[in-house]
Amino acid sequence: MAIHLTKESKILVQGMTGGEGMKHTRRMLAAGTDVVGGVNPRKAGRTVDFDDRAVPVFGSVAEGMAETGADVTVVFVPPAFAKAAVTEAADAGIGLAVVITEGIPVHDTVAFTTHAAHRGTRVIGPNCPGLITPGQANAGIIPADIAKPGRIGLVSKSGTLTYQLMYELRDTGFSTCVGIGGDPVVGTTHIDCLAAFQDDPDTELIVLIGEIGGDAEERAAAYIRDHVTKPVVGYIAGFTAPEGKTMGHAGAIVSGSTGTARAKQEALEAVGVRVGDTPTRTARLAQAVLDGGG
């Protein structure tokens, strides 16, 4: 099995005809993903050729869903149009919206994630690499060639660290890898993915990657204590980050003692999560746990 994305998923790409949309649609198709259409009101009715496949362009998400049965959309539109794009997708009843776009104003994100939740649409992102179920489907920008199917479920704030841990554990493999995004507000949290991996029979171990800023990892630790019986291995980025300076992601900022890497590590370790001090050591911890030596 997998979480949120399987080989049966049918994917629309909002912004498919733009530069990034074109590039990553081609990569998704090459990974075996069933991309069934793009969405661009100005280019509706056309088709776009990707190697050996012609993908139709629809005028709206609702039209694309009606014509293809799509249940996932990947959003590559510019920040100014992201709120409208996700709102449109949610109003059409899409099940999952993966928002790759970075630089979206926080008030727009609050608006569209709230709207989507009321409509029953799960949002992953924004400012995220998406998610991949190796060997089945890839929705976003995660390189498909660094992972194979396996027993680890990965949830990460950081796109780069998603790729790093996937590479480090490439010989073991993953059930699903989810990059939830590093903005202050995201549609899917660590806790959401922990719950899904806990219920997934093919996930034996969970790797959780966090970073400085906010309290998401502390809340995840409390959830693990109360609800997760599978082993969890963690990594927190940002131990050397200076106080008061944003590091990489908009949400990665430390104020006083709040949101520090050390506090997050301590919260996780207090509930039995083994936390590595580098990505490589984190991968070794995960492998040791799977091998029965952790």
Image (cartoon, rainbow, N blue to C red):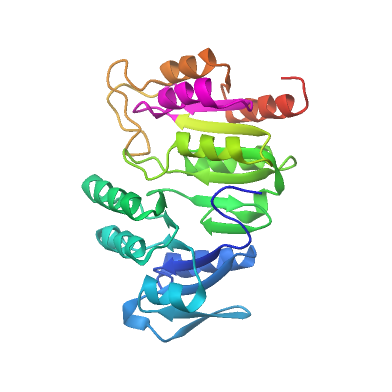
Q: Is residue 6 visible?
A: yes
Q: Give the percent coordinates (x, y) of residue 108.
A: 24, 51
- Compared across the picture, whether 114 is left or right of 193 comes to left
Q: Residue at x 59, y 32 (%)?
A: 207
Q: Is residue 88 magenta?
A: no
Quadrant of the drawing holding the C terminus: top right
Displayed quadrant of residue 254:
top left
Q: Quadrant of residue 168?
A: top right
Query: Which one is nearer the viewer's eye here, 166 or 221?
Result: 221
The residue closer to the viewer here, 68 or 27, is 68
Residue 244 screen position, x and y as percent: 27, 25
Q: How many numbered dots are placed on residues in this image?
A: 0
Kindly give the residue lying farthest to the left in the view shown: 107
Q: Is residue 221 magenta?
A: yes
Residue visible at 27% across and 62% down? 84
Q: Residue at x 62, y 55 (%)?
A: 144
- Residue 275: x and y, percent? 57, 21
Compared to residue 47, the image places residue 237 above or below, namely above
- Range of the magenta residues? 211-240
Task: Indicate left or right for 142 with 85 as reference.
Answer: right
Image-quadrant location for residue 287: top right
Determine if residue 161 is in view. Answer: no
Left or right, 23 with reference to 134: left
Judge by depth and name the residue closer to the eye, 17 or 106: 106
